[in-house]
Structure formats: structure tokens, C-alpha cells
Amino acid sequence: MLVSGNYGTYTEEIWMKTEKRYQIIPITNKIQEIISRSRIVDGLVLINPMHITASIFVNDFEYGLHSDIMAILNKLAPFFGPDGEMGTEYLHHRTGEDNGDAHLKRQLLGHQVNMPITNGVLQLGPWEQIHYAEFDGMRKKRILVKITGIIGDE
Amino acid sequence: MLVSGNYGTYTEEIWMKTEKRYQIIPITNKIQEIISRSRIVDGLVLINPMHITASIFVNDFEYGLHSDIMAILNKLAPFFGPDGEMGTEYLHHRTGEDNGDAHLKRQLLGHQVNMPITNGVLQLGPWEQIHYAEFDGMRKKRILVKITGIIGDE
Amino acid sequence: MLVSGNYGTYTEEIWMKTEKRYQIIPITNKIQEIISRSRIVDGLVLINPMHITASIFVNDFEYGLHSDIMAILNKLAPFFGPDGEMGTEYLHHRTGEDNGDAHLKRQLLGHQVNMPITNGVLQLGPWEQIHYAEFDGMRKKRILVKITGIIGDE
């Protein structure tokens, strides 16, 4: 169905501070609240972490799966602390950082998502849930939410 | 070149049911047909699987490569059935599911794409083809196609 | 904040030719220049490589990390030349190509990005930088930049 109307954009930043270094947090409700505030009723919502050691991804809201995601990412791009047992450090650590794994994990999981808005709500499949994945947490970070589309009647 | 006009959105769902559990299906023509139906001639098309054990991706329409994609994903996130030979199951399987690998594969391959529409058609490079990758098939699933942009003259 | 105005789109292609087969090139400034040329002041910019052996990604502009990215991708999807030491070739190589690894690396790193434009500029976090990753270079390739949003006053 073709829908038309006045075009607008709405931008809001969300602040996050996880309790753990590695953590997955569901944010679907938060995104829907921002959509409702935006007055945009049909279009797209871009959800983009503004930090490069975190991901936004869509998958099942199921804690076992969340652990599986962290486990596979750690197998593919392991954490090597300053005294990594394997004696191998990422070249990125020459800068003094110890979060090389976080930069890599965020790429493998996926950086950002764009989701559809129809009739004022996220148009989701039955199990689609939006999540924030943090790979270098315990400090304040931002997510950008940018909504573009048709402005609803007041 | 800057193009302007009346803004509209068009939303359509595609149903898929693959014959095999793991399968890659080219959908470029199907997406172009929806764009033609939409009357939107310039903008973006978001192609988003509404199920979390499938991917939309853009790559070569070449069956050898499609096998290579499935092989590498199975190396990185292997299938462990209920009686997995390695004795290791994903934690997700505690829910009774056996598709933990599918949730992970869809993240590694990539979840969704946004493609450009110019002059009424997908603006693609010479080898860019849009595909649906199914990792837990043989049942009905949906893909959401959301087009946003300039409405063409009637 | 809700912003409204006349909707427009702007499309431009960038040509790239890397010096090496595998190379990462920062393109944030180039994208900002195109945004400035477009006269679109608020909306989205889609940055999409038009070739299927390259990625656009957002991460740190730090050469150690860039080497780490290439290293992990080569671990996960190794290059096997025509005389690969492991005696294993990708099925894609039956076509006569030797770039099977490049097709896979581009999927693992991520294919494309959409970034937000606010007040005429890319709205980026402190370390977000846009990069082009080439996995089969030394030949001319294109990136599509598609900007959609509100047209600014002249």
C-alpha cells in the first residue's frame, strides 16, 4: 500500500551504561517509545551505536541465545588482556587500549539496523527484538535513533 | 543530482517456504517487481527478514559461492542437533529448539540490506544480486519490503 | 526534535582503485563533501559498495586495528590461491575466479552502512569513521552514495 504525507525527521540519543564489560540489553520498548514521541507514523528508524565497540542487532529475546552469541564471538575474536595467556595481542593494543576484541566483535555481530515503521509502530515479525550488545562497557555510551518518514496528524 | 518530489512509503510482505532447511534463494527480480508496483521512483528499499533465523544479503548469483557461504557459516557456527556428535549444545537449545546455529549464522552473514532506487529501478553494480538465506526452513516465513522515496507521476 | 521540509534525494558514485589487493581506506571526509554538495541537510546517507568483494564499515581510524581486521578475516575466510597450500579451494573458484575469500570477507565484516545527517553534517560519535575495505583490489570499483532527506534553503 502506498502512503503519502509530509516528510519529517526526528533524532534522539539514548545513553547506556552497562553493569558488565560484556552485556546484551533488549531495547525494543525504548525504541517504540521514541517512535511514539516523534509523531512520525510511517517510515524508517535507524538505530546506530555511536561507539565502535558496541552493536545494535535484531534477534530473539532469549538469554540462552544471548550467551551463545557472546560465546561464539569470543571464540572468533577472543579477548586478549594486557597479559593475554596466548601471548598474542591485537596490534590495536599498541595504542594502550585492551579492547581490540570489542572492535572486531561489533563488526561480526553487525553494527546497526534499520527497522520499518508502519501505522505508528515498529513493524516486527513475531520474534524480532532489537538489542544493544556492549563489548566494552561499564562507561557511558550513546545510541543514535534517527526516524525518517511521514508526520502524523496532530 | 538532486531530485525532489512528493514523499511516500510502500510496504509489502513476501512469503517464503524453502524446500530445504538451509537454502539460498535469489530475490532481485521479486524486489524489482515490488518497486515497480509501489510507484516510488527514487529512494530506498529496506529488505528485512521478519524471522530471526534468516538473512537478506547481496552477493554474487553463483551456486559455488552459495555453497561456500553455507560451508563457512557452518564452520563458524556449526549445527548441533539434539544428539550433536560433539556433545555440545547451544544454551538456546534448553528452550527445546534445535536451531541455535541458525540464529548465529544469520548474524554472521548479515541481517538485512537497504538498496538504492533511482529512475524507478534498483541501482545495482554489475554483480550485485539480492538473496534470501534460510537457515531453518521448510516452513512459511515472511520478508518485509519497505520502500520510501519520491512518488512518480501517474 | 522533529524537523520537516521538502524531501529530496541525491545520488553520486565514487570510484576507487586501491594499490593493494587488500586495503582499508578512510572515506569520512569524502562522504561529508558529497553531503555538502547534495543540499540535503537532514536525513540518511546510504553508502553501498557496488562490487561484492568490498565492504563499507564504521570503526576506528587506527592502522593497528585495520591490520587486526584483515588478520581476523583472513583467519575466518582464508585466501586460497589457485595453488593453495591447503589443497582446498572454494567452489567459487570453479568459475576461474580466485577471490572466493573476498566474497566471504565482505559479508563477515559487513556490506554497507546507513548514517544519519543532522544540520548538514554526518552525526557521528567521537570515534566513528567510515571506511572502505577492499578484498580484491588494484582495479576500478564504485561506491554508491545515496542521500535522502530534507532539502536545505538555498
Image: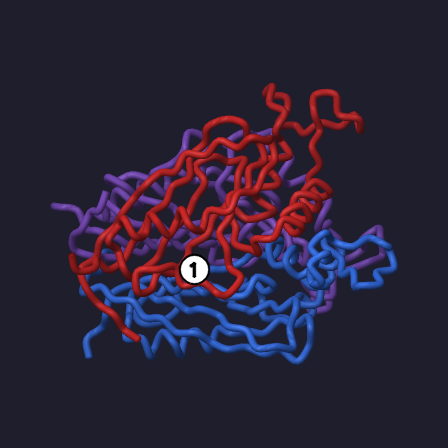
Chain colours: A red, B blue, C purple
Residue depicted at 78% across the width and 60% down the height:
B80
Viewer-closest of B5 and C97:
B5
Looking at the image, residue A132 lies above or below residue B109 = above
Q: Residue C149, how many percent across, how many down?
A: 25, 53
Residue at 52 percent of width and 54 percent of height: A58
Compare residues B10 and B37 and report the one nearer the observer: B10
Does C17 sit left or right of B99 as displayed?
left
Quarter placement of the C terminus of chain B: bottom left
- Residue occupying image coordinates x 22% and y 64%: B7
Q: Which residue is mark 1?
A: B114
Q: Chain of mark 1?
A: B
Secondary element at image label 1: strand
From this viewpoint, which residue is outermost toward the left? Answer: C154
| Image quadrant containing the N terminus of chain B | bottom left
**Viewer-nearest residue: C3 or C19:** C3
Q: Residue at x 53, y 38 (%)?
A: A54
> Is A12 on the left or on the right of B135, as rendered?
left
Q: Position of residue C151 (x, y in %)?
A: 19, 51
The quadrant where residue C87 appears: bottom right
**Crowd class of label 1 (few under 14; some 14 to 19; many from 20; radius 10 Å):** many
